[in-house]
Amino acid sequence: MHDEQKKDALFYESSVRFDANRIRAAAVYCSDGRFGEHFDDLLHNALQLPKYDRLAVPGGAACLAGHFATYREDEGVFAQLRFLVDVHGLERVVLIAHENCAFYSERLRVSALQLETEQREDIRKAVRKVRSLSRTLSVSAFFARKHRKDVIRFESVEL
Ligand SMILES: [Zn+2]
């Protein structure tokens, strides 16, 4: 019975080699899967941060900006980031917001006109909060925007 179960078990062996070394960098961004590969592209290729730790939550940095409506998410994300800083020894954190984020329109009820202003303000608040975890953390931020029909462009956010 046991052998039979084993024979039928599905498995998939990844061809990606495992490297146990940590890069000591994390990115906080929105869960929106349409941007997932673009976020990886920015982190891997533009910032040269392979194997970065991912903290993907709806709204991304919105959950580090102290919104009353989402204080539970705020506490959770901050605790998760603190864990990564302490246990994985983070030295660098990258925050990424994206255009037309549904977390803002649906959860925070921000109007389309105010959305980007609010997101940029949240990034600045989130950066201050992240920096409060460790004085030595290097923090940077980006805004992802649809540049042409199917091209995503990342703009560095001045902090
Ligand atoms: Zn989003």
Image (tube, helix red, strand yellow):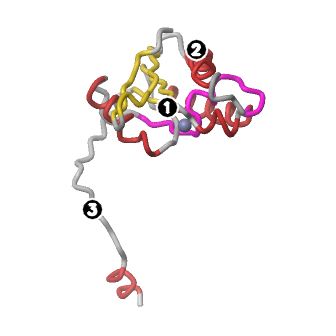
Which quadrant of the figure contains the N terminus?
A: bottom left
Q: Nearer the viewer, mark 1 or mark 2?
A: 2
Q: Amino acid at mark 3?
A: Glu
User: Tag 1's secondary structure?
Assistant: helix
Q: Circle 1 is placed at which residue position?
A: 87
Q: Position of residue 4 (x, y in %)?
A: 36, 88
- The percent coordinates of residue 82 (x first, y second) are 57, 28
**Which image quadrant shows ligand 1?**
top right
Q: Which range of residues does the magenta coloring cover?
A: 53-70
Q: Quadrant of residue 10?
A: bottom left
Question: Which one is in front in this view, the residue at disc 2 or the one at disc 3?
Answer: 2
Q: Is residue 143 above or below residue 13?
A: above
Residue 152: which quarter of the image? top left
Disc 2 from disc 3: Cα separation = 41 Å
Q: CA distance from mark 1 to mark 2?
A: 25 Å
On whether residue 32 falls in the magenta region, the answer is no
* Mark 2 / mark 3, whichever is N-terminal: 3
- Amino acid type, residue under disc 2 in the picture: Arg
Q: Which residue is disc 2 drawn over?
A: 124
| x and y percentages locating residue 119 in the rendered image | 59, 22
Secondary element under disc 3, as helix, strand or loop, is loop
Q: What residue is shown with label 3?
A: 13
